[in-house]
Amino acid sequence: MSGASEPREPNEPSEPIERDEPAGPALPQWSGDELLGAVEAILMVTETPVSTSQLATVLGVPVPAVAEAIAALAEELDASVRPRGLELREAGGGWRFYSAPAFAPAVEKFVLDGQTARLTQAALETLAVIAYRQPVSRGRISAIRGVNVDSVVRTLLTRGLIEEAGQDAEGGATLYRTSSYFLERLGLRDLDDLPPLAPYLPDIDSLEDIDGLSTSEGG
């Protein structure tokens, strides 16, 4: 008979059916305030900075919506009628809540009280040299500080505050630089946010004389 359809085999689907793979609990359709709260909740529990794209993926919303939510959160904190103990800051490639600088003494006492695993003065000085002179070899650091820094550099590597940055083109010594974890711990967006060094070391220009030293020492 004209126009009759062909018979189908048993269990043969008429059309392919597309199904989304399960991806955990279904997310609600966020309202403006709800999205604000969701972003705030994630940033409250994260131990590392979270990028806007990562937040957008997790929450199932466009990146611009997350960016607006972050801006609104920051504005709420800035406009608070009382001093707030935290601030929203971009650092280490993402966003995270940090304690407000005004309350740093209280936080420092709480965090460090009774702990012994803090950086020594030698480690802090070595880290400062690397931060401001990177990439730099152990030989150069030793020349600046006037002491051997091999063990201190190993400590900073173990803590994840510095990392290897290739080798010196002339002497082949290993070069070191600060890591993204360093930026995260200091709450910096990038190295440009480091405070100017000149006010603390007025004779910093004299360090340029060290540039002529061999970088092979302690490399």
Image (cartoon, helix red, strand yellow):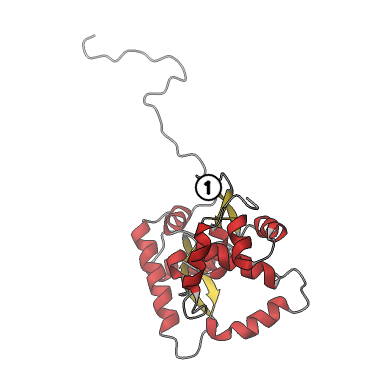
Residue 38 visible in image: no
Instruction: Determine the image quadrant of residue 102.
Output: bottom right
Identified by mark 1, the residue type is Asp
Question: Which is more toward the observer, 123 or 52?
Answer: 123
Question: Which is more toward the observer, 206 or 136?
Answer: 206
Q: Which residue is mark 1?
A: 168
Which residue is farthest left? 2
Which quarter of the rendering shows the N terminus? top left
**At x 49% / y 39%, what residue is drawn?**
21
Image vertical order of residue 205 relative to residue 82, above or below: above
Asked if residue 17 lies left or right of residue 135, the reply is left
**At x 37% / y 24%, what residue is drawn?**
14
Residue 63 place in picture, x, y as percent: 37, 57
Instruction: Determine the image quadrant of residue 64.
Output: bottom left
Question: Which is more toward the observer, 196 or 187?
Answer: 196
Asked if residue 64 lies left or right of residue 26, the reply is left
Residue 200 place in picture, x, y as percent: 52, 80
Residue 80 place in picture, x, y as percent: 44, 86
Residue 83 visible in image: yes
